[in-house]
Each structure stands twice: as structure tokens, then as C-alpha cells.
Amino acid sequence: MPDWWVYRCTGEPHDGLSRLPAAPPWRSFTDGPPRADLLSLPPRPAHLAGHKKGRYLQASRYQADREEIHLVNLALLLRRPLLVTGSPGVGKSTLAHSIAHELKLGPVLRWPVTSRTTLNDGLYQYDAIGRLQEVGLAERLAELRRGRRRGTVRSGKPSEPADIGRYLRLGPLGTALLPWRTPRVLLIDEIDKGDVDFPGDLLHVFEEGEFTIPELARLHRPSTKVMTADDEGWVELRRGRVCCHEFPVVVMTSNNEREFSPAFLRRCIRLEIPQPDETKLARLLEAHLPEPEAGASAVHAALIGEFTRKQDEEGAKLANDQLLNAVRVAESLWGDEQGRRLISEHLLRPLNEG
């Protein structure tokens, strides 16, 4: 492996990020003396402590080719977003979790995109209605305590408005842009499903690394405590401004359902994950499943061959986890001809087949 690689896809957490050179001047967001308000990474969610569930297990056993690893490191070096394309199920989203796991960058901030997604959804959400309801309830209770009846003229000092910070929550992008001591990993999943203007709306934030929350800025308060996208996370914002210390590790996935503008593409490192070949599939099985016995090795080879045959000869779109499921079931059904047919027709059924 090249010495300058920080991410190596070994599945073993390490402190290699400390070897990453300083950001290029045009991608640096730090000027002047070191900031005193840098944040430490949040702990792993309590309900997952001591467990290797779901994404955490997949992240530790992710398999990437040399070119994929190379491009990830280019994105880290240049502090540029990584645009990952490929068919569904090849591991685009898992790559973000693999980077966070190996480089010890904390929980991944995931932002799933739909046709209704806007930039503001990722920056922050403000529950204005909830705040107004609480203000109204507080005023009503105050009137009752003063023994006044409904409809009388109010007098005296008005009720103190509810703390606005309790009704503001930073989204995944807003949380990623906080001044973390170590950059966070932000997964913007299926960006191609968004509105035609959505990728362009991201460009300003990607270039500036900061944004302001108008609802806080107009209050002229020195600081306000708001919620983050992390479980039970809170942070203190000064003058309603969010500004990153280091650009986050941004992984954007796309299923190639649309084209992106040149202005957007030139700001990204583009990585296309191809359909895996037999060698990569064998590594995938070796990483996720116990070492097979002598007879089971032939079953693995047969299923890998069936998987690649469907892709190459029939143009089938298949996901990696379909092969894992097929191998797991084959331990019980492979000796039966009907069982083999069920595995081929149902567990290895192409995703592009109705």
C-alpha cells in the first residue's frame, strides 16, 4: 500500500487520520489561532455498545478494490466530496460506514434524499408551530394563576417566550459542519433522487463550509443551545452561525438515474463501483462467512459462478447481499435439486426483473 494512504480498507480501526496533510489552501476553513470551541466526537450509541450489529459489522468487513481505495484517499487528501455511483447493492452506502469505522470518525450522519428533499432539510429544522403552542399555553396558565377570566384585557409583564433552542434541530449536513476536532462522515444517500436543483444548492455550502440560522441570528443573543442530529446531542451556537473546522468526509451515492451538472461534478471526486468479479465475490464470502468445510467450498464456487453468469450472460442486476443469502441457505438446501432451483430463481432473482 502507498505510504500516503490513510484509508486502507483493512477493517481494523486506527489513528492514521493524524498523518493526513493539512488541507489545500483553497479547501481550508481555519484561519488565525486555533479555535477553543472544537467538539469531541460523540460516543457510539448506548444501545449498540458492546455489539457489532448491522452496519457496524458490514463496515468492518467491507471489501474494496485498489482503485476504490485510491479514490477515497484522494477525496480525503483534497477535502472534496466523494460521488459514488454504481448499481444497487454493490456497497456504495457501506463504504461511508467503512471509512468512519476504520478512521474512528464516530457515528455516520446519514441523509436519505427523496424527490421532496431540500437543502434546508439537511441544514436544520425549526418547529415554529410547537414553539407558538407552548407560548400560548404558558400565557394561558399565567392568566389562570392570576384568576382572570377568558376575554379580559391582559395586564402586567408578558410571558417569557419559550427557549427557541428547544425547537431547533440541526440536520445531518448541519451537524457535519459543526467545528468537530475530527471530521465527521456524512452520507448523502441516493442524491440522484433529489430535485434537479438540489445538487446545485449544495455547492455553496460545500464551498463555504458554513451557514447561518436566521431564526437565531435575528435574536441577537450571544449564544443558543440547540439539538444536533446525534442521539441526545446538543451544541451551543454563537450568533446562530455554524462553521466547520475541517471539511467533513462527504460520501454521496447515486444509482445513475440522472446526470449532474459540470459545476457539481468538478467539485467532486468520482468513484464508480463496478459489478464485482469472481475474485471480489470470493473475498466477500470469506470476510462475512465462517471458513467453509471441504464440501462447502465447492458450493461457494458454484454460487459465485451462477452469480457472475447471470450478470454477464443475462444482464442481470444483482446485489452482493443476494449472494450472501444464497450461500447461507445453500448450507441446508444445496443437496436437493429443487432447493438449488429455488435459490437460483428466487434468492438470485435479478433486481431489474419485474
Image (cartoon, rainbow, N blue to C red):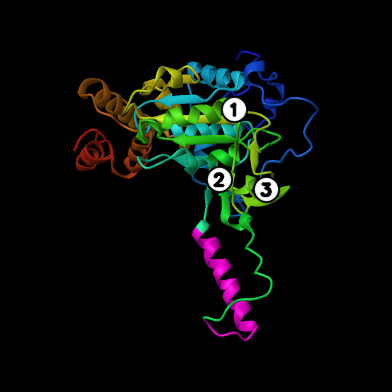
Depth order, front residue of 57/5: 5
Q: Nearer the viewer, mark 1 or mark 2?
A: 1
Q: Is residue 262 magenta?
A: no
Q: Nearer the viewer, mark 1 or mark 3?
A: 1
- Image coords of residue 205 (percent x, y): 55, 31
- Residue at 67%, 16% in the rendered image: 25
| Residue beneath the point at 52% across and 57% down | 128
Residue that badge 2 annotates:
52
Amino acid of disc 3: Val
Which residue lies under the disc numbered 3?
235
Element assignment for label 1 = helix
How many C-alpha atoms fall within 10 Å of the one at disc 3: few (<14), some, or many (≥20)?
Answer: some
The residue that mark 1 highlights is 208
Could you say where residue 82 lies in the image, as x and y percent from the top left? 50, 24
Q: Earlier in the sequence, mark 1 or mark 2?
A: 2
What are the residue bounds of the magenta stretch? 129-150
Q: Where's the N terminus, which quadrant?
A: top right
Query: Closer to us: mark 2 or mark 3?
Result: 3
Q: Amino acid at mark 2?
A: Lys
Q: Mark on residue 157? A: none
> How far apart are the two marked residues, 1 and 3, measured between alpha carbons?
21 Å
SS at mark 2 in the image = loop
Q: CA distance from mark 1 to mark 2?
A: 36 Å
Kindly identify the residue that appears in the image at 31 percent across and 28 percent down. Answer: 257
Residue 323 percent across, percent down from the top left: 35, 34
Q: Residue at x 59, y 73 (%)?
A: 139
Task: Give the vertical position of 24 relative to 62 (above or below).
Answer: above
Q: Main secondary structure of the magenta part?
A: helix
